Image (spheres, rainbow, N blue to C red):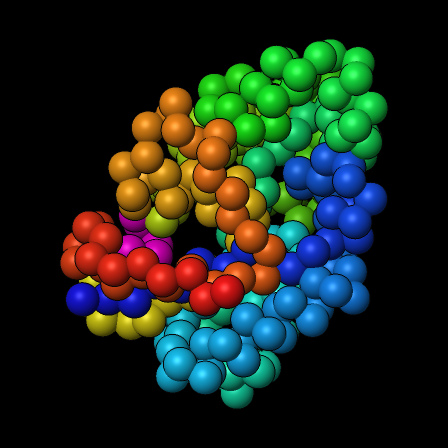
Amino acid sequence: MATLILLRHGKSEWNELHVFTGWTDVSLAPEGEREARRAGKKLAELGIYPDVAFTSVLKRAIKTTFLALEELDRLWIPVHRSWRLNERHYGALQGRNKDEVRKEVGDELFWAWRRGYDTPPPALDWNDPRHPRFEEKYKNIPPSELPATESLKMCQERMWPYFVDRIYPELQAGKTVLVSAHGNTLRALIMKLEGIPPSEIPKLEVPTGTPIVYELQGLKVKKKEVLE
């Protein structure tokens, strides 16, 4: 069996402001830094030490990865970054207060955008300066591949092939793998691993800074433990 550790980044500066973040590259709040360190300590206490780590190209996930690894005295292991592990792109909602959006569009549409499976928020205009094609970190990615909005389904469709092609082989090789990413990226991954249907996915919440440890046989979950 193989061990897979999923870790949602600690609370970010925008989590505290209750705004849609998505691909906006905000940093961890002080509480988020503490959460990341606590996650590393919990893993160390249980003797769960990753051999390799994967994260997104967003600083809140990257910082969480390295803060947790520092507590594990594991800063030397390989860390791979990919935009395919980025948070779901919230399109034109990015930077907007969630309560204000909810009042504006009503509960049904708000929750479909925020927690549903296949309803994307309004897209960013191609020339909007917030579009990822204007960011240096994505300069080597064809602009046509970069999202201007995403549903959870669309996020899953760009994340899952990366998991199968890059992360799963490390698990097959018997390594303990840490994936430090984002709430929706990890919801999409958990949905695949646990066979959760789209109708049930709105109920799934991934807490910040809390390791979720899977024992896998192939892609079949044999054991799951949430280290609260």
Q: Residue at x 50, y 65 (%)?
A: 228
Q: Residue at x 74, y 20 (%)?
A: 102
Q: Residue at x 70, y 68 (%)?
A: 33
What range is drawn magenta here? 164-170
Comparing 3 with 75, the one in front is 3
Is residue 204 toward the left or the right of residue 23 in the image?
left
Q: Is residue 122 visible?
A: yes
Comparing 148 with 118, the one in front is 118
Is residue 208 toward the left or the right of residue 100 in the image?
left
Determine the main secondary structure of the stretch shown in magenta. helix
Q: Is residue 46 highlighted in magenta?
A: no
Is residue 75 toward the left or the right of residue 10 in the image?
left
Where on the picture, by quarter, is residue 107? Answer: top right
- Relative to 70, say whether 144 is above or below: above
Q: Residue at x 73, y 35 (%)?
A: 20
Where on the picture, by quarter, is residue 41? Answer: bottom right
Q: Is residue 83 visible?
A: no
Q: Quadrant of the N terminus?
A: bottom left
